Amino acid sequence: MDRLDFAIKIARKVGKLLLSEWGMPLTVSHKSSFQDLVTDMDKKVQELIVESIRRKFPSDGILAEEGLDESSENMWVVDPIDGTVNFVYGLPSFSVSIAYVRSGEPVMGVVHLPAIGETYYAVEGRGAFKDGERLSVSSRSVLKESIGLMGFFRDFSGRFLSEIEDRVVRVRMLGSIAVGVSYIAAGKADFYVAKRANPWDVAAAVLILREAGGKVTDFNGKDEGIFGKKYVFSNGLVHNEILKVLRKFG
Ligand code: IPD
Ligand code: CA
Ligand code: CA
């Protein structure tokens, strides 16, 4: 079995397990603050994914959000639940994100949305797909026809929103970078602005978006990989307009 089939299979398997506690997790604890939630399901699902990888691909490295850093040249990058807050509260935008990274570049990525029942995936050079259907970014080229997505970031979201709210059709906060960026790949939204990202949040989605024809940069417009902090993800066509708005923020 190749790595893509393996990743889709394990993501769907743990997705079923996640649904058994969706909106009613048995345990919730806090990491860095009252806003930073983690459940035993985050850890359990990570463990299941990690065990499976170790069994099938024992020489691969693994970097996973819940305290596992066995990084190497060829490694898996795993976020067991991207959107834990949504998972805890019973909202549907959460995902299992699994990527395979060679020399720092994602070459395979899977983002599975258990509550919505969709799986987005890509392999480098082979296009991006959702459940067998080829994905392509939107062709919207002006902000006034666009929908933007963003994260929830203290000292930033409010300012960005007030700058952008009169220029776009809507802005949404979905609560999972991996879901939001996959939606841009599918042409359901046109840009996403994120700060304080981690490799496990973006590794799979960066590849899915690139393979769907989208663009991934930092706030200065420089191409970004999976180890950035500040990101603009877009269909490519509205990218410069967003960068212009962001320039005001330094
Ligand atoms: C979070 C989500 C959220 C983003 C945060 C991430 P988590 O991941 O992707 O949308 O704004 O920066 O940390 O904690 O649910 O895995
Ligand atoms: Ca995450
Ligand atoms: Ca997570």
Image (spheres, helix red, strand yellow):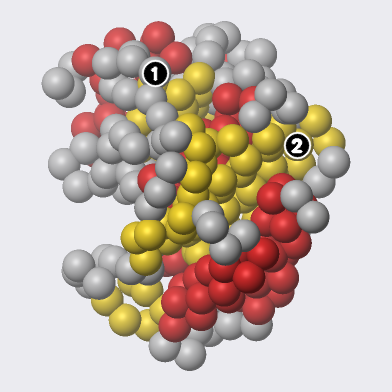
Quadrant location, the N terminus: bottom right
Q: Which residue extends farthest right? A: 132
For residue 233, say whether it is visible: yes
From the image, tell me which residue sits under label 1.
223
Residue 73 on image: x %, y % = 43, 42
Q: Quadrant of the C terminus?
A: top left
Taking depth in this image into account, of 97 and 149 the one nearest to the observer is 97
Residue drawn at (31%, 81%) of the image: 29
Placement of 28 over or under 128, stated as above or below? below
The image quadrant of residue 241 is: top left
Q: At label 1, which amino acid type do we have?
A: Asp
For the view shown, which residue lies furthest in the bottom direction? Answer: 26
Residue type at mark 2 is Phe
Q: For residue 122, what is the image quadrant?
A: top right
In this rendering, the answer to whether 77 lies above or below 103 is below
SS label for mark 1? loop
In the displayed orientation, state which residue is furthest to the front.
59
- Residue visible at 74% across and 27% down in the picture: 126
Mark 2: secondary structure: strand
Q: Nearer the viewer, residue 50 or 227?
A: 50
Q: Residue at x 33, y 68 (%)?
A: 67
Circle 2/circle 1 CB separation < 8 Å: no
Tell me residue 131's x, y (percent): 81, 46
Q: Position of residue 205 (x, y in %)?
A: 54, 40
Q: Nearer the viewer, residue 114 or 98?
A: 98
Image spot of residue 99 (x, y percent): 56, 47
Q: Who comes first in sequence, dot 2 or dot 1? A: 2
Marks 2 and 1, Cα distance to the nearest angstrom?
23 Å
| Residue under numbered circle 2 | 129
Q: Residue visible at 46% across and 58% down?
A: 62
Q: Is residue 232 above or below residue 197?
A: above
Q: Estimate how packed mark 1 is, as few (under 14), some (14 to 19) or many (20 or more) residues with alpha carbons within 10 Å.
A: few
